[in-house]
Image (tube, rainbow, N blue to C red):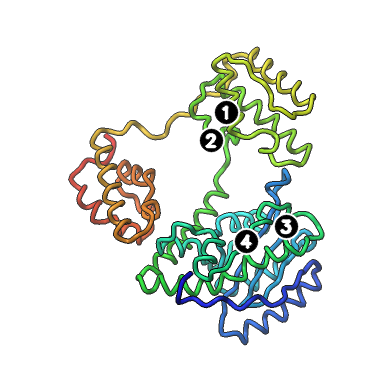
Amino acid sequence: MDPSAQTPVPAADHEFIDTPAHLEQWLASMREWMERSPDKRCCLDTEADSLHHYHEKLCLLQVNCAGRYALVDPLAIADVSPLLELLDAHELWFHGADYDLTMLRRTYGWRPRVVRDTQIAARLLGARHFGLAALVHHHFGLELCKASQKADWSRRPLPPNMLSYAVDDVRYLLPLADLLVAGLREKGREDWFHQSCKSLQEDVAARDNAPREDPWRVNGCGRLHPKGLALLKAMWEWREGIARERDLPCFKIMSNKQMVAYAEQFEASQPLNPPNGWRPRWKKEFFDIITAVAGSDAASWPSRPRKSKGRLTDAQRDEIDRLCRFRDQVAGSLEIEPSLIASRGTIEELVVQGTPDHLLMGWQHQLLAEGIRQGDDVAVTTG
């Protein structure tokens, strides 16, 4: 427990809001509250049902406006734009905002004006355990219940234990933010934090706007040949249909890892057996897919993706290793994770492309600048 921290005052009773009229009434009181409050910050967290249904959807919005709490039901209220307008007028805090921002953008087309993330702040201060429960325990000596973490948030009514869990997700964010921001200022890293939060928003928008080609090419498929890719594609399409039909998340039918393993066995002409517990119909269709792919024309099989990166030269590999060692030394002196400064993949791109500006935030470039200058006499671009 942080000896300088004081346990936050327990939250006042929250309001569960599931009608437009109730939402407007609460927002009217919040506008007055925020005008009077010296603290102009808000917090937001979301709960979805991706672990339980095929079509992922937002199921709950947890809001904390300067110490006033509400749980808003987006399944019952189609238009939450008045709430988003209120939040947009204030500095908005999250914890681990990536998923929340992605879901808010996909559901409402909304990108908050100012985002702050306590998880980013904690990592910039060197925290190795940066989940919300870990940080609340470290700073306040409190244990948060995780029992509802994987619950089905689309169920109604939500039981008291799930409502309590939901409120806790925003109850401690502002006191936690106060401690983390104080630490960032003390270490001169507040600007790093602001840059990182802005970069997070840009990354979410870019990822969501990027076209998704061949979604069946899941992790691990890069080691497959056309024959295995053909089976993987057929299994992926079959799994999608079953998951949609049953309203189940795809992984509950068959995991990506299992599909890749089947494709590898298929390439090696090994026997394939469906998972235990499958319905008879699914088992039949499983073997039908294998038979169909085995009898298909090899010319119709998907090709292996071409590698976008050329082979690295010996000089480039040496430069990458040197910059990684330099990064590790800098990170060690700052007591932060090296990947926060730059991942190895980013360093490879820096070396191959010649330090393009878009690869690093300003503070990252400053930390690596000396190491980059030391390598200026090394050929870093492909010929």
Q: Position of residue 76 (x, y in %)?
A: 80, 61
Q: Position of residue 152 (x, y in %)?
A: 73, 52
Residues 276 and 3: in front is 3
The mark that comes first in sequence, 3 or 2, is 3
**N-terminal-most mark, 3 or 1:** 3
Please give left or right for residue 149 compared with residue 261 in the image.
right
Residue at mark 2: 219
Circle 1 residue: 260
**Upstream in the sequence, badge 1 or badge 4?**
4
Which residue does the image show at 68% across and 47% down from the upper left? 51
Packing grade of label 2 (10 A; few <14, some 14-19, many >=20) is few
Q: Does dot 2 land on a helix, a strand or a loop?
A: loop
Looking at the rendered structure, the kind of residue marked 4 is: Trp
The residue at 34%/50% (across/down) is: 356
Task: Give the alpha-carbon distance from disc 4 to disc 3, as whole Å.
Answer: 16 Å
Q: Amino acid at mark 2?
A: Asn
Q: Separation of disc 3 and disc 2 at Cα? A: 28 Å
Residue depicted at 55% across the width and 22% down the height = 264
Q: Name the kind of residue labelled 1 in the image.
A: Val
Numbered badge on residue 110: 4
Residue receiving disc 3: 59
| Left or right, residue 125 beside residue 75 | left
Q: Residue 139 — which label?
A: none
Secondary structure of the residue carrying tag 4 is loop
State the image quarter where residue 104 is shown: bottom right
Q: Which comes sooner in the sequence, label 4 or label 3?
A: 3
